[in-house]
Amino acid sequence: MLENADTGVGFELVMSSVTTNILKSGSLSTLHEGMQNGDWKLQDQSAENATADIYDYLYYRTWFARQNYGNFAKTIQRFIHPDATVLELGCGTGTVSNLVGSQCNCMDFSEKMLSIAKTKVQGSCVQADMEHLPYVDKTFDVVFVNSALHHFPSLDKIIQEINRILKKDGHLLIQEPNSHSIKKDALLKVLAYGIRKIGAKKYPDVSSLEVRPSDHHAPLLPSKLITSITTNGFGIESLRHRYYASYILSGFDSKLALIVGKLLDRSYVWKMKQGYMLVVIARKGQSIEKVSLPLAAFGVIVAILYCYDYVKDRKNPVWYDPMPTPDI
């Protein structure tokens, strides 16, 4: 255990089966530097340490939470080849890395979270600050973050650091609760009433067990996240909202509620153009300019074909459906 002379706070490098060639020399100093730059980080670290032992109970006990973590893990697995080096930033207790199943390396700035994570993962567990990563340049093929970026008031430094440690054409996958206005409509109110009437119980309120972190915590604005990604060396390959009905019904300790929510999620997200989670897949070095040229060419071709069909249809009009039913 080392101690920062300026703050008197101890920091630890926690590893299991660590491959030291992925770390820069003087790795611990990066954590010290980040912590000195903002007292809110010390407040967050204290909150994370205080909840580490009950973190999985707070955030992984529900049907909805297990679905959420599992789906994100499956998305990540699509980008991992047998020899890939993989890193999770803000890993918490290592649940997502454990679900991904490969030898994920984990990073968090809570030593108590990492002490739990290292019992779940085969790769390294390193205590560090996301704005000052201790890893060597161009080390990882895949970096992913689950519900950790909203801890930070600014994202640019984090995205720049991720760009630095990713290999060329490496992938960044992010899942974050985003700013939304999800509400029950008439159908969801009826479904919730029916599920309650057939005996489904609600989960107990555990909000009193949570330790409040720093004041700036809030769901991310999608525009803020997208801007930070696209202005710091990444191109976005996929951007989608997830979970609407299943989030509304997530308070029930009922697999039926989960199934009903899953069946309705896609249509609600399509109709409302929002969801509880925002999932972004980005690739390093794929700038907007490189992507926009082929897309523009494709758009021109589509426009030409559309005009051709329009002229032809004016001679032989056919009926079309202006509001196609979404594929559920």
Image (cartoon, helix red, strand yellow):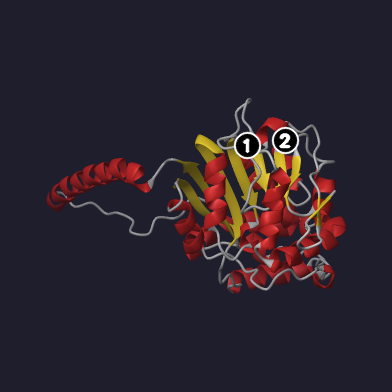
Q: Determine which residue is flagged by label 1.
A: 77
Query: Which amino acid, mark 1?
Result: Gln
Q: Quadrant of residue 74?
A: top right
Residue shown at the point (62%, 69%) measured from the top left = 218
Residue 270 % position (x, y):
49, 59
Element under label 1?
helix
CB under 8 Å between callouts 2 and 1?
yes
Q: Nearer the viewer, residue 150 or 11?
A: 11
Q: Earlier in the sequence, mark 2 or mark 1?
A: 1
Crowd class of label 1 (few under 14; some 14 to 19; many from 20; radius 10 Å):
some
Q: Determine which residue is flagged by label 2.
A: 101
Q: Is residue 119 left or right of residue 32?
A: right
Residue shown at the point (57%, 40%) measured from the top left = 165
Image height check: is 16 above or below 226?
A: above
Whether residue 75 is visible here, answered yes or no, is no
Residue 27 % position (x, y):
70, 43
Query: Which amino acid, mark 2?
Result: Gly
Element under label 2?
loop
